[in-house]
Image (spheres, helix red, strand yellow):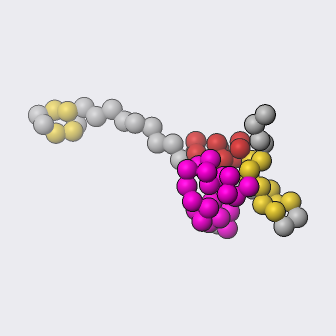
Amino acid sequence: MQKKYLTVEEAGEYLNTGVRFVRRLIAERRIAFHKIGVHVRLSVADLEAFVQAGRVEPVEVRWSGGRAA
């Protein structure tokens, strides 16, 4: 069974980043989180939404005479 909510440490592992980065995202309110008493939990769906929001689509470059047109 896959977890719905992750701790800050687990979220760091999930995103392949450090705990400090996840805590900064929370402090800056750049990612949604749940406060349960003194505990902070992050939804896997919210982490995926954050990753997808940062997705950059590739562009097609056309070359003409050695330069991008």
Q: Range of the magenta residues?
A: 7-27
Q: Nearer the viewer, residue 4 or 61?
A: 4
The x, y position of residue 42, in whole percent, is: 74, 52
Magenta segment, prevailing SS (helix, strand or loop): helix
Taking the image as shown, residue 34 lies to the left or right of residue 27, namely right
Residue in the picture at 86% in, 60% down: 36
Residue in the picture at 12% in, 37% down: 66
Taking the image as shown, residue 50 lies to the left or right of residue 64, namely right
Whether residue 51 appears in magenta in the rendering, the answer is no
Q: Is residue 29 visible?
A: no
The x, y position of residue 38, in whole percent, is: 84, 67
Q: Give the image quarter of residue 4.
A: top right
Position of the C terminus, as image quadrant, is: top left
Circle count: 0
Q: Nearer the viewer, residue 40 or 67?
A: 40
Q: Is residue 36 visible?
A: yes
The x, y position of residue 60, in whole percent, is: 33, 32
Q: Nearer the viewer, residue 62 or 28?
A: 28
Q: Is residue 55 above or below residue 7?
A: above
Taking the image as shown, residue 6 lies to the left or right of residue 55, namely right
Taking the image as shown, residue 37 lies to the left or right of residue 46, namely right
Residue in the picture at 71% in, 42% down: 45
Residue in the picture at 88% in, 64% down: 37
